[in-house]
Image (cartoon, grey):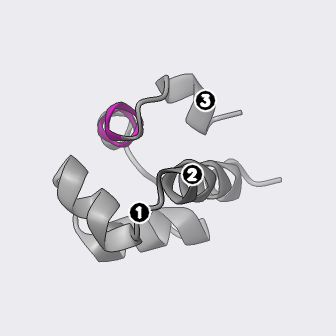
Amino acid sequence: MDIRKQVGLNVRRYRETKGWSQEELAFECGLHRTYISGIERGVRNPTVTSLERIAQTLEVEPFELLK
């Protein structure tokens, strides 16, 4: 599977576990909702800095988003 799609699936899974919408996640980590949407759909190639921000917000280790 494409790594971008895998990251997107993991972000979505952890976000839904928290019961957050894409908009809530975006607000909490200071990113735009359409950016989060692009990551979850596997069409955006997030930077490591963005992945770190998302992981911190979701309270997981960054490597968990890559598994």
Residue 22 vs 27, above or below: the answer is below
Residue 56 falls inside the magenta stretch: yes
Q: Along the horizontal axis of the image, is 33 left or right of 61? A: left
Which of the marked residues, 1 or 3, is nearer the chain's N terminus?
Answer: 1
Residue 44 vs 14, above or below: the answer is below
Q: Secondary structure at mark 3?
A: helix
Q: Along the horizontal axis of the image, is 20 left or right of 41? A: left
Q: Residue at x 58, y 37 (%)?
A: 65
Which of the marked residues, 3 or 2, is nearer the chain's N terminus?
Answer: 2
Please give the range of residues in magenta. 51-57
Which of 63/15 is in front? 15
Q: Residue at x 63, y 48 (%)?
A: 10
Query: Where is mark 3, residue-wise?
Result: 64
At label 2, which amino acid type do we have? Answer: Thr
Q: Are marks 1 and 3 in contact (CB under 8 Å)?
A: no
Q: Residue at x 55, y 59 (%)?
A: 16
Q: Nearer the viewer, mark 3 or mark 2?
A: 2
- Residue 47 pos. (x, y %): 37, 43
Q: Are marks 2 and 1 in contact (CB under 8 Å)?
A: no
